[in-house]
Amino acid sequence: MKHPLQLIAEENRAGKGTGIYSCCSSNPYVLRAAIRKAIRYDTPVLIESTANQVDQFGGYSGKTPEEFHAWVRELALEMGLPVKHLILGGDHLGPLTFAGRPEKEAMELAGDLVYAYAKAGFTKIHLDTSMRVADDDPHARLSDEVVARRGAELCVRSEQGFAELRKKDPEAQPPVYVIGSEVPIPGGEQEATSSVTPTEPEALEHTYRTFEEAFARAGLQDAFDRVVGFVVQPGVEFGSESVFVYDPDKARGITAAARSYPNIVLEGHSTDYQPRRALRNMVTDGVGILKVGPALTFACREGLYALENIEKELLLRGASFEPSAFRSVLDEVMCEDDGNWRKYYPGNEAEQAYQRAFSLSDRSRYYMAVPKVQEAARKLMDNLSGAMVPYVLLDQYLPLQAWRVREGLLSGDPESILEDRIGDMIDDYLYATGVTDTAMM
């Protein structure tokens, strides 16, 4: 039986304009929003955790691959999503978080990571060996041959992990793979840039053949037949305050070249904040998998700020609950541990504070699982759940959600409102991938 992503790739290649978005997040509000949309439209949802979110040591989410898989599966079942519609994937699996170590050590750890994902039952595996490790020449481009060799080594470990899974579950579905060498860094650009150049067709051809040969040497022909996606740069990216919008004409060379590979689609990374028409153009041009992460947590953070503003107005009106101080708590935690944002947010103290609160890179997502932040968010939800939120305040700070509440389309509890705000961002991707057919919703 073919993997759902293989079927989507076939439909995309047949010119049906179908695709799928990948929800790259471990944020529970984001995951519930994505699952709720999948239930509404009776469509698959692809949820991916990145190598820094979830790894064999817990990652910044505090969960191992096995724990994350079990948690998301349980969440989906509780909400009523059919198991057949849940696809779990691992993003940027490789030496990403071990790149400061020599190759032997970094690849051993990366191999353990990929093994753990496959054994846990993740069925979409992005093998990413595009980054240099400690003993690579820091001034030389990492060759396709090195990237492909390392990718094949990790694929061996993935297949071993899947074999272990099969011992417990003979019906387990083999993983499909995403490969490539020109992979944008996770989470958007670290430094300002003036342009983004799409991958050249010749680079795609060389990289594809190099991976094919490396997999063949490693005895991985069956696994290579399950390659469903290829990561290229189609000309999209975002930084702290800028977005490079997809241009079909500039990307025509790479999207046309990709059509010579009938069994794969292109996978677009850093598609966050693209206009929905641009996203739709990407899918119809063959970028059949759209990765999004920071834009979803950005929408979550916007929603939480808006709900806190409502909370503040209720306090001014005489409400007796203790304020959540969500925004202050989040910023305090970020300042206590600046390792996940400082190199991304240059400038003086005021400029950095502004970026911590509003940057498109949304480095605050790394701190949402911190207990103090979770406690503040929960207090905010409890405060608003126990209060009668006036329509005028909801309309002031979350007008779309206010309209839906008024029309009886949305519950007025704060968690539903927050998930719906995140869902506004997801709607762009559902339109782009052919799930909905309305240009504006």
Image (cartoon, rainbow, N blue to C red):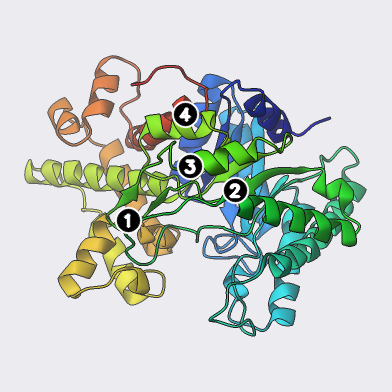
**Label 1: how many residues lie within 10 Å, few (<14), some (14-19) or many (20+)?**
some
Residue 300, image x, y percentages: 36, 45
Q: CA distance from mark 2 to mark 1?
A: 49 Å
Name the kind of residue labelled 4 in the image. Ala
Instruction: Give the number of callouts.
Output: 4
Residue that protrudes farthest toward the left in the picture: 317
Q: Are marks 3 and 2 in contact (CB under 8 Å)?
A: no
Q: Is residue 280 above or below residue 265?
A: above
Name the kind of residue labelled 1 in the image. Ala
Q: Is residue 310 above or below residue 60?
A: above
Query: SS class of the residue under badge 2?
Result: helix
**Closer to the observer: label 3 or label 1?**
3
Q: CA distance from mark 3 to mark 1?
A: 44 Å
Image-quadrant location for residue 44? top right
Horizontal side of residue 339 vs 83, given as left or right: left
Q: Which mark is residue 251?
A: 3
**Label 2: how many residues lie within 10 Å, few (<14), some (14-19) or many (20+)?**
some
Q: Are marks 1 and 4 in contact (CB under 8 Å)?
A: no
Q: Are marks 4 and 3 in contact (CB under 8 Å)?
A: no
Query: SS class of the residue under badge 1?
Result: helix
Q: Residue beneath label 4, please?
A: 432
N-terminal-most mark, 3 or 1: 3
Query: SS class of the residue under badge 3?
Result: loop
Q: Residue beneath label 1, please?
A: 376
N-terminal-most mark, 2 or 1: 2
Q: Residue beneath label 2, please?
A: 201
